[in-house]
Amino acid sequence: MNKRFVFSLLALLLLSACSGDRIVLLPDPDGKVGKVEIVTKGGSQVMDRPQTVTSVSSATSKPDAPEAISDKEIQSGWGKALAVMPPPPETFILYFMSGTSDLTNASEQALPGIIAKMKQRPVLHIVVAGHADAVGSEEANIAVSRDRARVVRDLLIKAGASPSVFEVSSHGKRNPLIKTRDGVSEPRNRRVTVTVQ
């Protein structure tokens, strides 16, 4: 499921829960808008335009057609909920030297930015996924991608993250960023993705 959609849907559900029978669809922080369908026993209504609101009078009535809503109305009805919404997840990519769990110089320099984002979260969850390129055996690639993920996790723990906030996985050469044939060295596939939530 698309992270942007999950964030939009979460925002929508939180906002609707706070406002009773009115549901508002807001854009993501980057201005993009998803699409959601409100379904009751009486019918359904699709919302796909930003800053629109629909009302549902009961579980057996059809939701009203979405209407535009002003910033002032949104703040009045949902301002408190918006104030406590968590920031959207941010994903970073760190790259590694071939066949090793040694970060490239550029990726070492990117670590302080990840750590800063991590420390801004009041509630923290970090997803770390290790990857390898298509050089070497499946077993070697699984091992090096696992080592890469552990190295990044350990660096973030050293920077202050609790070990309990991590979800760590390794993919070997599966799920490449750049598709290649077996045996092809591709620096962009030797990576760890870090998603700070």
Image: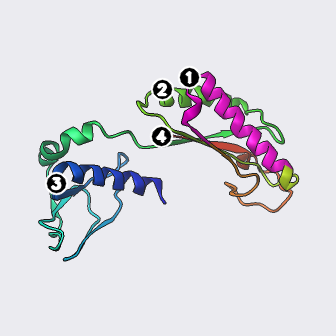
Is residue 135 visible in this depiction of the protein?
no
Return the x and y of residue 68 as percentages of the image width and height. 15, 59
Q: Point out the frontmost of discs 2 and 1.
A: 1
Q: Sort mark 1 into few (<14), some (14-19) or many (20+) by Cα contacts within 10 Å.
A: few
Residue type, numbered disc 4: Gln
Query: On the image, numbered disc 4 is attached to which residue?
Result: 197
Cβ–Cβ below 8 Å for labels 2 and 1? yes
Report the span colored magenta. 140-167
The answer to which of marks 3 and 2 sits earlier in the sequence is: 3
Residue type, numbered disc 1: Gly
The answer to which of marks 4 and 3 sits earlier in the sequence is: 3
Q: Sort mark 2 into few (<14), some (14-19) or many (20+) by Cα contacts within 10 Å.
A: some
Question: Is 119 above or below relative to 20?
Answer: above
| Quarter occupied by residue 121 | top left
The numbered disc on residue 82 is none
Query: On the image, numbered disc 1 is attached to which residue?
Result: 160
Query: Disc 4 versus disc 3: distance between alpha carbons?
Result: 27 Å
